[in-house]
Amino acid sequence: MKFSHYPSVLTIAGSDSGGGAGIQADLKTFSALGCFGTSAITAITVQNTMGVTGIHSIPANIVQGQIVAVMDDIKPSAIKIGMVHSTELAEAISDTLQAYQNTPVIFDPVMVATSGDKLIREDTVSVLKTALFPLMTLVTPNLDEAEILTGQRITNLEEMRTAAKALLQTGCTAVLLKGGHLKGRRLYDVYVSTQGEEQIFESDFIESENVHGTGCTLSSAIAAYLALGEELPEAIALARTYVHNAILHGKDVKTGHGHGPLNHFFNPFKLHIHEMD
């Protein structure tokens, strides 16, 4: 007997009250790409376009409960992880995901907000690498995060390649090192995998103040495309195109007084429906 279902994705991340990043950006991205979004909230941030003024952590057992409730019932085809700001949460998420190792996981190791506010405790960085990275299908740090994770200064494309390969040594399957902070006419992201793959993704730089949540959106889009059946390199390429267009269509819109959001719904899809036996 055949039945229909929506391709679904789980985001494990923090809530952004301003709506531009975190859980809110993830769910918007899933919806815009035609996937059914689910969530496990790790923290509630007091946040708007100007910055972050407070973080309230969700107890680790509640985060675990949210993940299990979704995974055992709805059974998402992909998982995206964002803000994991404490060692307790990192270890709890790692323990919980051990039971779901057949599901691809994209980890955007959020450490600093677009406003410059820090979103992670100092003692958590090493635990992310030892507890979470080995379970990850893809890790997507930006340059600031990669410098924290590797201890290396990154100022050009060659140093990006070196840092990306260094991050592979943590046990993750693949790394996409995002070079958006190297301002120039062209943007470069470096993809490397344990299978020996290496690819440089390029795109034009768009001048915009509305880039809050770009990293969250990219990692969520990659997860969504995996849930839709794409292979990882193609999912990355499609996700980058989606983010590029979301920035382009939102660059002239004023939301708040600081770093505004992307236009996630510049060309939304209806929910996809897949048939299964």
Image: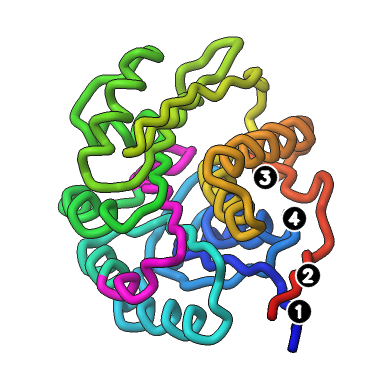
Name the foreground residue: 68 vs 19.
68
Secondary element at image label 1: strand
The residue identified by callout 2 is 273
Of marks 1 and 2, which one's residue comes earlier in the chain?
1
Please give the name of the residue rendered at 52% of the width and 56% of the height, measured from the top-left corner: 22
The answer to whether residue 149 is left or right of residue 160 is left
Q: Position of residue 55 (x, y in %)?
A: 38, 62
Q: Earlier in the sequence, mark 4 or mark 2?
A: 4
Residue 150 image label = none
Numbered disc in front, either 1 or 3 = 1
**What is the CA distance from the residue labelled 1 to the residue labelled 4?**
20 Å
Cα–Cα gap, marks 1 and 2:
6 Å
User: Mark 1: few, some, or many residues within 10 Å (few <14, many ≥20)?
Assistant: few
Query: Reading the chain from its start, which is encountered first: label 1 or label 4?
Result: 1
Q: Tell me the magenta residue range.
A: 95-118
Q: Amino acid at mark 2?
A: Ile
* Spatial separation of the CA atoms under disc 1 and disc 3: 41 Å
Q: Amino acid at mark 4?
A: Ala
In this rendering, the label closer to the viewer, 4 or 2: 2
Residue bearing mark 3 = 256
- Disc 2 packing (10 Å; few <14; some 14–19; many ≥20): some
Q: Which of the labelled discs sits on residue 32, or is there none? A: 4
Q: Amino acid at mark 1?
A: Ser
Q: Amino acid at mark 3?
A: Gly
219 in the magenta segment: no
